[in-house]
Image: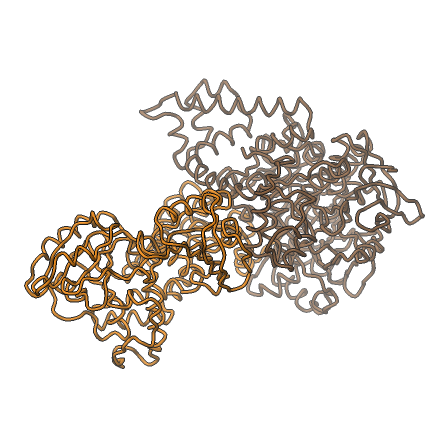
Chain colours: A brown, B orange
Amino acid sequence: MRDFDVIVIGGGHAGVEAASAVARLGARAAMVVLDPEAIGRMSCNPAIGGLAKGQLVREVDALGGEMALCTDATGIQFRMLNTSKGPAVRSPRAQCDREAYNREMVARVFARDGLSVVPGEAVRILAAANGDHVAGVELADGTRLAAPAVVLTTGTFLGGKLFAGADERPGGRHGEPPAARISAALREFGIRLGRHKTGTPPRLHRDTIDFSGLEEQLGDEPPQPFSFRTERLELEQLPCWLTHTNERTHTIIRDNAHHSPMFRGLIQGSGPRYCPSVEDKVVRFADKPSHLIFLEPEGRDSTEVYPNGISTSLPVEVQERFLRTIPGLEAVEIVRPGYAVEYDYILTDQIRGDLQVATLPGLFAAGQINGTSGYEEAAGQGLVAGVNAARFARGEAPVVIDRATAYLGVMIDDLCRVNPDEPYRMFTSRAEFRLLLRSDNADRRLLPLARELGLVDAGFLAGVQRKEDRVRGARELLDKVWRDGRTLTEWLRRPGVGFAEVEAHCVGLAALALTAQERSEVEAEVKYEGYIARQRIEVERLQRLEHKRIPADFDYAQVPGLSKESQERLQQRRPLTVGEASRVPGVRQPDVQLVLVMLQKHRVPKSGVTPATS
Amino acid sequence: MLGDTILALASPDGGGDRAVVRISGPAARALAGLAFAGELPDRRATVEGHLRVRSRLVPAMALVMPGPRSFTGEDVVELHLPGSSQLVTVLQEELLQAGSELGVRAAQPGEFTARACTNGRLDLAQAEGILMLLHAADRRELAASVQWLRGGMSEAMGQLRQRLEDVLALLESGLDFAADETGAVLPADVLPALAGIEERAAALLGTLPAVAPGGEVLLRGRANAGKSALANALAGRQDVLVAAVPGTTRDLVRIELGDEVALWDAPGDLDRAGADAATVDRAPVDPATVDRAPVDPATVDRAALALRDRLAGRAPVALAVLDATNPRWPNAAAPAAGAMTWLAVVVTKVDQPHDLAAVERAIPAVAGELPRIFTSAVARTGLGELRALLLRAAGAGASAAGGPLRQQLGGVLASARRAAAALTDGPELAAMELQGALRVLRADASGHSAEPLLDRIYGRFCLGK
C-alpha cells in the first residue's frame, strides 16, 4: 500500500527540485510543507547563481530542473561574472524579484502533473515493522502518508533557532516556526546530527535610502539567459548600488560586539567563513578601514532593499545605529532586522553518493540539512535526491554523478568524504576538472544522463544536439579559414583574442549567428585544447575503478580475509561504487582490493546509469 | 585514488634453487591468494603450502608482510618457489593476467625502492641523503649529506610546497571570488612568486649529487673475488674510496667511470644473505665534518644496508666477478630487490696461476653465452676491454642517484615556468599547472580537496558579501 512513490518534506529550493524531478520521471510525489505560499521562497539574498553556483544552476537546468527557468522569468538584473578570465570560470548571476520568484515557483509546483502539495508539519519518519526501511511520514495532525521513499529538505528549519542581540527564539526563517520534532525522529534512527549557523542582513526601506551619491552597478546588455531553454530575455534591468562601511560604523560595531550572540557564546554552530557577519569582519580584520556593501533591490515594485555584505545578529537598535553611519543610509529605516539562525544538519559521513542516508534505506536528504549553504547547492542536491528516490521507489539502480561530469558530482562526493565543518559552498577550485565543467557546456555534459533517465523532453534533447552541431560547424570553419598566414583557430588560441575579434574577420562565422553560450563553448574548446586533453587522461584514470559498481546485495561477510571492522563499516555504509568504498573512513586500501577481487570472481554485470563525460 | 600493485622476480635471474617473486601494493595479498593454495593470514606470517601454476601444484612458501611494517611500507607478499626459470616465468605471467583489473603490473627496476621512499619507510630526501653519503667525494659534500639526512632537504621541500600553495591560493582567490571582494589578482602579483619558486627549485636541483646518466652497474661476486681492486683499477685510483664514511666503505661504494657509467661495488655483503649491521666495520666519525649533532652511525649503517638491498633493484645490470684462483659463482641467495641482467663474466687475478677449465665449470649454464673478460688489477690487463664493454652497455639507462627528488624538483620547475607562461592565457590555466606541481610534491593517494586552499584564502582575505 502506498499513497505516493516519494514524499518530499520541505518546499524550499531543494524540495522544489526534488519533487519536480520525481514527477518528471512519472512517479507520484507529495510535497509536505508548513505553508504552501512559502514554496520556493528566497530567505536570504534575492539572487541566483554567482561564481561556481551559476554552473550548478545550469547543470540543474540541463537535467530539466526549475531554477533557471524561474530565474529567467523573474530576473531584474543579469550579469556574467569573471568575463575578464577564461570560459571555465565564468558564471552567470541574476538578481530576482523576490515576490515574483516565489509566486512563479508556487505556480510551477501546483501546475506539475503527478505532484501533490500537502500542507502540514511532518513530525515523524515511519519505518517498516522490522525498522530496516522507510514506510512513510506522519504529520502533526496524525495523518499518515505511506511511501517507500522520503526526501528530507528542511533547510534551516531543523531545530532552528533565531538570534538577534539578546533575543533568542525558535524559528526556521523570519516569522516562520521551526521543524522541531523531525530532529528527534532522526536521532531515534541513530542518525547523528551537527549544528551549523548562518545569518542574514537587515532589510532596508528603499524610500529612506539616498542613492544620489552612490555608485551604480548595471546588468549586462543584452542579458544572457540562465536556462538552456530560454531563447532570449527581454526586460528592463534594474541597477544595484555600491556603498561601504567606515571607521564610525566599525566603532559602533566594535563597542557592541559583546551583545552579539556569536561573541557571547550563545551560538554553538559554526558559521561560514566565506560569508562572515559584519561584526566578524570588523573584529577579525581590524586593520581594514572599510567593507563593501551592495544595495540590491528585492524586486521591481518592492520597497525592500537587501544590503549584501552586512549580515548581523547585533541587537536591532545597534543595527540601526551602525547603518546610519553609512553613505546613503543616513536616514535609513529597517523593514526587517538581520538575524543569525542556528540549525541541525545530518553529519554527511552518513550520506551516500545517491544522497540516501546509508543506515535507513529509502530516506534521502538534500540541501542545508546536508550541511551545505546556498539555493543553488540545495537545488542541485534536491534534483539528484529526487531522481534517486523515484528510482529507489521503483526498484531501479541508483544514479551517481562523478566528479568529472558535473559540479553536482563534485559536491556530493565532497559531502560523502568529509563532514563539512562550516556550511559547504561550491567553489570552482573544488573541481579538479574545472576546465571541463563549464557553465556553457552543462547541457552537453549531462545530455547522456538526461536522455537515459528521461528527465527532459525530446525538444530539449534536439536543442542540445542542434547546439552541438553548430559548435562543430563553427570549429570547422575556424580550421579552414585563413588570415595572415594562420587559421582562425590559431588566431583564437592567442592570448587576449576573443571570439568577437575572430568573427569580425569571417563573414561565414558571423552568418552562423552563434548564441553567447555557443561562442563561449567554441572559445573554450579552442583555447583549452591542450589542457583539456591532459585533464581527460586524469579523468580516465579516475573512472577506471571509480565507476565499478558494488551490487546492493553484495555480502561483505563472504569476502575472505576482509577485516571484521571493515566488513562492518562497509556493510553499514553500503557504498555504491568501488570509488566510494575506498573513501569510507577507516576502510584500508587492501580491504578495497579484496572487495574488488570478490567482485571480479562474481563478474557482476554493470548496472545503472553511468554518465559519459563530454 | 587506488594505487597500483607491482610484482617482480626478487631473486637473481636464472640462478639458485629457490626463486622469490615479490608483490607489493594494496592488492598484494588478494593477488597472492589467487595463486597460493592455503590460507594467507592478514598478519605477518610465513605460510607453507602450494602454488597453482598452470593448474599444477608446486610446493611453495609465502611470506606475508602487511604494511606499513614491510620493505616498501605497503602490503608485501613474497612467494618462494623452486628456482626454475620456466616455472617463475609462467607464475609471473599468470599473476599479471589475473591481476590486470586489480591494477597489478610488473615492477619497474628500482620501483620497490621508490615505494619505500614514497611510503615514508624512508623519507625521500633522507634516502637521497644516504645516497649522497655513499658518493660523498670530499668532506664538504659529506657535511651536506649529513645535513640532508637530518631532514634539511625534507624541510626545503616542505617550504617549496608552501610557497606553491600560497601562489595557488592567491590565484584561486581571484577566480573564486569577485574582484570587489579580494581585489583583482593581477599577473604582476603572481609572477614574482612564480619566479621565486622557479629559482628555489633550480637552486635545490643544483645541490643534488652529480649523476651518471648512462648506466649503473653492480659488481657481484664472492668475498675476495677482487671486486674492489677491479673497481679501483678501472677508476684509476689507488685507495678505497670514501674511507672516512662510517659504515659505507665495507658496505657499498659507487665509482663513477667518466660521465657515463657508475659501478656499484658491494664487497662481500651482497653475497652473504642476512648479513646484519653489526658485522660492518665502522670508522670513527670525524667531529669536524659532522656538526654538533652527528647522525647516529648505527642509524646510518642500518639505513645504508637497507639501501644496498634496494640498490640491487636500481642496478639492473651486473657483472659477475670470479676469482681465477678460486672460481665460485656469486651467491644466488643474496638479497636482490629486482630482476638482474648479467652483463659479462669478469675473471680476476689472471696474473696468478689458475685453471681455466675450473673457471668454466663454475659458470652456470644460464651465463654460458656471456662474454668472458680476463683481467688483472696488478698487471692492468683486460681493463680497456672491460671499460669499453661498460660504456657500450651504458645506453641501457638506469635510475641515477637523486632520481626521485630530481624528478620532483624538475616537475616543480617546469610547472612554475608553464604557469608563468599560461598566466597571459588565463589564471585558471596557471592554477591547473600549479595543482599538478602540488600533486607531484604531495605524492599522496587522497583525492582532490580544496579545503587547505580555502583555509589559506580565508586567512588572508576578508570575504563575503
Tell me what residue is drawn at x 30 percent, y 57 percent. Answer: B202
Tell me what residue is drawn at x 40 percent, y 24 percent. Answer: A479
Residue A215 drawn above or below residue B19: above
- Left or right of residue B157: residue A596: right
Q: Position of residue A124 (x, y in %)?
A: 86, 51
Tell me what residue is drawn at x 23 percent, y 64 percent. Answer: B265
- Left or right of residue A325: residue B42: left
Residue A64 drawn above or below residue A304: above
- Left or right of residue B143: residue A270: right
In this rendered view, identify the residue nearer to me: B301 or B358: B358
Q: Position of residue A349 (x, y in %)?
A: 67, 54
Q: Position of residue A551 (x, y in %)?
A: 66, 42
- Left or right of residue A348: residue B18: left
In this rendered view, identify the residue nearer to me: A47 or B175: B175
Q: Quadrant of residue B93?
A: top left
Residue A145 drawn above or below residue B465: above
Question: Can the viewer see residue A11?
Answer: yes
In this rendered view, identify the residue nearer to me: A444 or B189: A444
Residue B249 drawn above or below residue A579: below
In this rendered view, identify the residue nearer to me: B433 or A323: B433
Q: Position of residue A304 (x, y in %)?
A: 75, 45
In this rendering, the count of numbered labels is 0
Question: Can the viewer see residue A217?
Answer: no
